[in-house]
Amino acid sequence: MLQREFDVVCLSHLRWDWVWQRPQHLLSRCARHRRVFYVEEAIFDGDTRIEVDETESGVFVVKPHVPTGLSLRELDAVQQTLLDELFVQFEIDAYLLWVYAPMAVTYAEHLTPIATVYDCMDELSLFSGAPPELRKREDQLFDAADLVFTGGASLYEAKRERHHSVHCFPSSVDADHFAQARAVATDPADQAAVPRPRIGFVGVIDERIDLGLILELADARPDWQIVLAGPVVKIDPATLPQRPNIHYLGAKRYEDLPPYMAGWDVAWMPFAKNDATRFISPTKTLEYLAADRPVVSTSIRDVVRPYGDAGLVAIADDVEATIDAVERALARNADEHRARVEALLEETSWDRTWSSMQALIDDVLGGGRKLRRNAAKPFDYLVVGAGFAGSVLAERLATQSGKRVLVVDRRNHVGGNAYDHYDAAGVLVHKYGPHIFHTNSREVFDYLSQFTDWRRYEHRVRASVDGRLVPLPINLDTINELYGTNLDARGLEEFFASVAEPVERIRTSEDVVVSKVGRELYEKFFRNYTRKQWDLDPSELDASVTARVPTRLNRDDRYFADTYQAMPLHGYTRMFERMLDHPNIKVLLQTDYREIDGAFPFDQMVYTGPVDEFFDLRYGKLPYRSLEFKFETLDYEWFQPAPVVNFPNEHLYTRCTEFKYLTGQEHAKTTVVYEFPRAEGDPYYPVPRPENGELYKRYKALADATRGVHFVGRLATYKYYNMDQVVAQALAMFRRIETGAPTGAIAEAPAERNGSRVRVVRGRPGR
């Protein structure tokens, strides 16, 4: 997260309120932390002044008004004067210069920014009407820039030899925004009368669009309706193809795009194959996919690779191939396509792109005007993983020890598995299944209270058994409802004593349950649930699994009995964002720590990922269980009578969670999630079996001998910890680091004091 002691001045050839695209996405995120001035190209209206408007996102949009009939030299001089007026009016002193328009380099040559970024989103010299001076001025911009970003892989390949620090940042997507299309039921008024099927396009209609292909398709399939939404630029509207089944809807606001896409049967990108499209990386590719539309495109290089090669976009250049691709898209398997798209969207958010750009900018500002990849270590710690373990340690190291910390995570968000967000219906959901906070630790609760207010919440679960929804854990009401009895606490104790099976030595999960409540209740509540969850019989699992679920002799139906039971008032994600909001902490998302080898040197590492992966699976893979989630939004205020319903003996899923119980949100609709245990996928649960424990011990020995790395968290220590236990473990690890005690390579539990000193080689841990 960037410090606030400088502004950002952006020089652009694009109008801010024209089409919401790359500059708007990036600079709106930048404006969350500092002042951003977005200087548009000149407006020729006979005046000489600047007009400044602040947008809802916090960006100051600067419109230079200039006289008509100026020569290029005169125009540069006027714009330079107006730029100086802006700096005086807003007292801009220290600033980062962000450039989209190479033509601006001349009237900005007198500026003295702390650094210059050239975000090259298009090959402008190939566009219709490009000034002949543009290529020369871009050469000057390359000389002045400290960093160069490119808007796609093709541009990167074309520019990478022209500067010492060129970085590829292809188009990204605000997936949640376009996912709203999946829940839209009403067409916009100007699209509602258009028959089906509809083949839709949204974007600028200019020399990059293949108007001939549009006309051919309209003539070949008059039963298909072609919907084109967007401004017409640089071409005469009179030259646009006209047919009864071609519909021009005009420019649309960014916030209105999902409802239009929702009404299409196929999304289309009919780009021409010409100089103007040689290097484009269309933002709309991911937007269409996030809206759950099948996509057909001409063979634009940055669409073919990777989307066409991955089978996510159909590629077709002529009318026959386009007809075939559209027909196949109309008959697609929506569920299969959706699952593949979701995996892609996880890796392509604008938040991730901005976070990665931030880290590169910070490296420039921390190490001098030019990026020095082998400069003296700018970070004291590299923290791998932005979940509880990594975020707690990053916060403690930054705020209490004054250390500079780089946090990296392979996902596109902070918070690890506790991440929550608003779905397309506006319901706050937990992306990776329900996370219920509870603890007996005052230290843990007080620590987290620095970053969130709390909503009191006591969790309750029902189990579907014998056609009834009965309380879980098993209590007095559970037994009375199941058996039609009227027992009191003493009677229930006697009942359990009569059905319990003595076990000489408790070794397995089966032993735990049958020794407490007998075999019949074991079969009704535990055995099949455990089989689904772990793909193992309870007799094959360590006793710790079912020991987590108590039984009660009273009517207390709370799932937990901890002293502190609450939910973050504004959600987990907001809590993590506040935890990591410190000038000494930089966050780099959607990045594998191995990919940044040498780019961001550091002294020590905190590692919270799978311990076996750290050592390249040297002894084989540690077994984990994973989950697949099926979310459903329903047109009910409430769906089920409890926050969670377990299904021990029915269905392939183990439980259903209704999030509004957890969050306290008031909403006309509700969203639930069903959990399907899986053998493959993200690692969630270490499998507690003796042989797995022995395998882990071999990795622990490697970790203990690895200098320079602190292993913390559920995955790094192969333990089935609750959230509060991970926080306690991280706090204990920080105390060991802070006091200079021998630093344990692996923190087995908060109280342990094992390990050796640490060593780092070239910004990567020694092996």
Image (cartoon, helix red, strand yellow):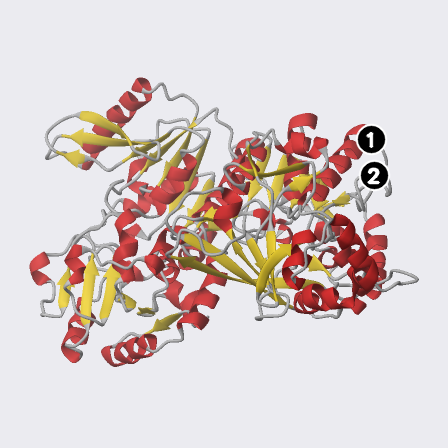
Residue plotted at (11% across, 63% down): 240
Camera sees residue 165: no
Extreme residue in the right direction: 504
Residue 351, relative to residue 300: is it above or below? above
Foreground disc of the pair 2, 1: 2
Task: Say what amino acid the circle numbered 2 marks.
Answer: Ala
Residue 591, relative to residue 454: is it above or below? below
Residue plotted at (60% across, 62% down): 627
Mark 1 packing: few (<14 Cα in 10 Å), some, or many (20+)? Answer: few
What SS does tag 2 mark?
Answer: loop
Q: Is residue 436 left or right of residue 354?
A: right
In which image quadrant can residue 542 be found?
A: bottom right
In which image quadrant can residue 701 be found?
A: bottom right
Camera sees residue 237: yes
Q: Which residue is the site of mark 2?
A: 751
Of pointers 2 and 1, the one earlier in the residue sequence: 1
Q: Is residue 545 left or right of residue 54?
A: right
Residue plotted at (27% across, 76% down): 322
Residue 191: x and y in percent read 18, 60
Extreme residue in the left direction: 238
Residue plotted at (83% across, 53% down): 700
What SS does tag 1 mark?
Answer: loop
Q: Which residue is the site of mark 1?
A: 740
Q: Is residue 645 left or right of residue 55?
A: right
Foreground of the two, 284 or 533 = 533
Residue 574: x and y in percent read 52, 38
